[in-house]
Image (tube, grey):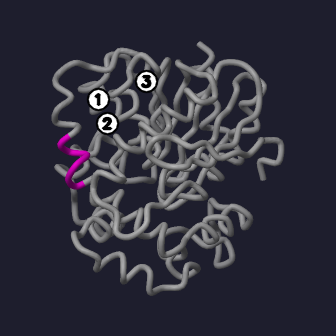
Amino acid sequence: MLEEFSLETIETSGARIRVRQAGSGPALLLLHGFPQTHVIWHKVAPRLTSYFRVVLSDLRGYGDSEVRAGMAGDDDYSFRAMAADQLEVMKALGYDEFLLAGHDRGGRTAWRLARDYPRSVMKLALIDILPTQYVWDHMSLPWAMTAWHWLFLAQPGGLPQRMAQAMPASDLMASLLRDPAKGPSPHTPEAYAEYVRCCSARSIAAWCGDYRAAATTDLLHDSLDGSDKFDRPVFLAWADASHVAKGAHPVSVWSEHCRDVSGGPIRSSHYIPEEAPDALLEGLLPFLLG
């Protein structure tokens, strides 16, 4: 996967970040979600390199990017901290402005980057997410049973970390994702194996820090944004089979925070870049090129 992409590690003020890049044209940064790595883009990124300089990055604590030692504090894995890493990555590569797309946790990191550094983000694409505060305020029983990891990993102290670390990585990943060896899955065997490889005791500590921050520090940061809306173009894609489409219209919700929002649903599960890359590109590419 992604053999045509160069590989390097970039030292930022917050963490060492593993980065791949390929292609030519305007810079486009793609950010992945939980519990995955930049490999989630392996069906999408190669098809974008004819138009863009595509940068794939592992978030802090994920993949082969740096994991802080010990139990992470809420600030260590806040979306603000992870967004600052990615901004520094792009500046180190020579890009003061760039296009930005993120899925899941990568989408939340992308949103914080856009809010904190609005002049750096030319256009923003958010894939299968609603605002973090909105998610907490509109939980339902079916949602909580499906997205149990939001509540479990966010618990204070070391209990969720120790419990998750006690499981073999293959078993933990099978509880979070659909194992292609056990039936239909949006993940290829190669991609799934990479997610299992990157699941370690140290990455689990980072995941817990990420989800604790989403219930504490990130909400504070979001509350301090004020009423000013993000004024660069925003594209939304959401899965018709995911919780995002249940009981809310994403364009309407995000319009409370953005001035220029477009997009629509895709027939897919949550893992759109892997399950429905053609449909995603059908909407994403015209947006980025327009």
Magenta stretch encompasses residue 107? no
Report which residue position mark 1 lands on: 252
Which residue shows up at 76% across the image and 38% down it?
A: 46
Q: In this view, does 178 lie to the left or right of 146?
A: right
Q: Which amino acid does label 1 sit on?
A: Ser
Q: What residue type is labelled 3?
A: Val
Indicate the position of residue 181 as horizontal and vertical percent values: 69, 77
Q: Residue 234 carries which label?
A: 3
Vertical arrangement, residue 254 with respect to residue 61, above or below: above
Q: Residue at x 77, y 41 (%)?
A: 5
Q: How far apart are marks 2 and 3 (CA)?
A: 15 Å
Q: Mark 2 points at which residue?
A: 249
The reply, left or right, for residue 144 in relation to residue 245 is: left
Mark 1–mark 2 CB contact (< 8 Å): yes
Q: Where is residue 75 in the image (x, y as percent from the top left)?
A: 29, 51
288 left or right of 154 in image = right
Per the image, is 218 magenta?
yes
The percent coordinates of residue 77 (x first, y second) are: 36, 53
- CA separation, marks 3 and 1? 12 Å
